[in-house]
Image: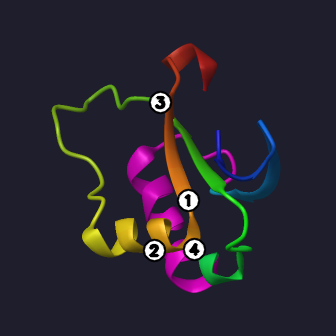
């Protein structure tokens, strides 16, 4: 999967930008998302609502932990009107 940045139009959303193409690992995806937020999210039209849909598969060896959603990340998302969706897929979907 990838991270899809989607623009909300009416009651629907439209794909706008694809990040972390074919990467199913939540940690590396979130690193890509964080980097994009800090460098390019300011280009999003603040008059629209946005969705960051992060599609991932759970790690087989996972025993807890994962990426940290810092206050800085939350503030950027709030200022750019970005809602985060975490879309979990089973191993067979990847």
Q: Which residue is mark 1?
A: 82
Q: Nearer the viewer, residue 23 or 11?
A: 11
Look at the magenta stretch and give its main secondary structure.
helix
Give me the C-alpha separation between circle 1 and circle 2.
Answer: 8 Å
**Which one is earlier in the sequence, the residue at label 4 or at label 1?**
4
Label 4 Cα neighbours within 10 Å, binned few <14 / some 14-19 / many ≥20: few
Dot 1: few (<14), some (14–19), or many (≥20) neighbours within 10 Å? many
* Colour scheme shown: rainbow
Nearer the viewer's eye, disc 4 or disc 1? Answer: 1
CA separation in Å, label 4 and label 2? 11 Å
SS at badge 4 = helix
Q: Which numbered disc, 3 or 4, marks the residue that appears first in the sequence? A: 4
Q: Which residue is mark 3?
A: 57
Pick whichever of labels 4 and 2 is earlier in the sequence: 4
Which contiguous range is marked in magenta? 21-40
Q: CA distance from mark 4 to mark 1?
A: 13 Å
Point out which mark residue 36 bears. Answer: 4
Where residue 71 appears, as percent x and y from the top left, is 27, 70
Q: Residue at x 19, y 44 (%)?
A: 65
| Location of residue 94 in the rendering, given as x and y in whole percent from the top left corner | 61, 26
Q: Tell me whether circle 4 and circle 2 mark residues in contact (CB < 8 Å).
A: no
Q: Are marks 1 and 2 in contact (CB under 8 Å)?
A: yes
Task: Between residue 34 and residue 23, name the one nearer to us.
Answer: 34
Residue contact at pointers 3 and 1, CB within 8 angstroms: no
Circle 2 SS class:
helix
């Amino acid at each position: 999967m990838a991270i899809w940045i989607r623009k909300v139009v009416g009651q629907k959303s439209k794909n706008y930008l694809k990040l972390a193409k074919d990467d199913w690992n939540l940690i590396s995806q979130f690193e890509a998302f964080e980097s994009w937020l800090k460098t390019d999210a300011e280009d999003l039209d603040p008059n629209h609502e946005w969705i960051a849909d992060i599609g991932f598969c759970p790690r087989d060896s996972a025993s807890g932990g994962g990426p940290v959603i810092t206050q800085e990340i939350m503030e950027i998302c709030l200022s750019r009107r970005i809602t985060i969706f975490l879309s979990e897929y089973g191993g067979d979907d990847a």
